[in-house]
Image (cartoon, helix red, strand yellow):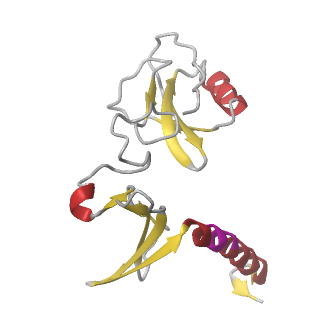
Amino acid sequence: MRTLPTPPACGEPATVRIELYTDDSLDACAYTCPAHTIHVTAVVAKAGMDAHPVGMAPDVDRPCGYVHVFPTGTLADEPTDQGHPRWCDRGDCQRRGQHRSRARHLDTNRPEAFIVDVALVQALHPAAEPMVALTSVEGSAAASLLLSVGQARVLRYRLAHLLDVAKATHNGGRWR
C-alpha cells in the first residue's frame, strides 16, 4: 500500500474531482475547491502519482479535502479476505473458477466492427499466475485470448511500435 498525501481540508464545497492514478490504475479521487486544486495536484505528483483534475457531476456534494480510496487500488488497506488478489472484483470467484478484474472496454468513441474487452484473470489454484484476457464480440460470436503477463507486456511494446509506424506513414488523412 502506498501512502496518500493528505490534501488541505478547508471544508468549502468541492467543485473539482482529481483522479489519482498509480501504475495506470485509478486508485483514488480527491475533491477540492478551486483554491486548492493546483496545490493538491502538485503534492500528488510529488508523491509519484498521476493527478488528473476533472469536473464533478452536479449531484455530487463533497467538501474540499475529501478523498475516496478505491478498495481494489494500490492505496487501499489490505483486504480482509487474503484469498483474493488486490485487483479481483470478488464477484463469485468460486463459481467462475477464477479471480477476475473488472473488464476494461476498449472504447474508441466511434462505431467499431468488434467489441473488445480486456481483464486480468487468475485460476483459484494457489500457484496460478495472473493472465490477461482479451475478449472480442461480433454479433452473437465471441472469441477469447489468454496471454501471460509477460506476453501482454511484449504485446504492449509491439503495439506501441506499430502505432508509431502507422502515425509516421499517415499524412493529412492519406497514407504515404
From which residue to which does the magenta span run? 153-157
Image quarter in which the N terminus is found: top right
Residue 136 placement, left or right of 42: left
Query: Along the line of sight, which residue is nearer the eye, 91 or 20?
Result: 91
Q: Position of residue 171 (x, y in %)?
A: 76, 81
Query: Along the line of sight, which residue is nearer the eye, 34 or 132?
Result: 132
Image quarter in which the C terminus is found: bottom right
Q: Is residue 3 within the magenta segment?
A: no
Residue 96 placement, left or right of 100: left
Q: What residue is drawn where x is 66% and y is 72%?
A: 154
Q: What residue is drawn where x is 53% and y is 47%?
A: 25
Q: Residue furthest left?
A: 95
Q: Residue furthest top?
A: 10
Q: Is residue 89 above or below residue 15?
A: below
Q: Is residue 154 within the magenta segment?
A: yes
Q: What residue is drawn where x is 46% and y is 11%?
A: 11
Q: What residue is drawn where x is 25% and y is 63%?
A: 96
Q: Position of residue 67 (x, y in %)?
A: 47, 25
Q: Position of residue 23 (x, y in %)?
A: 61, 48
Query: Along the line of sight, which residue is nearer the eye, 6 or 97?
Result: 97
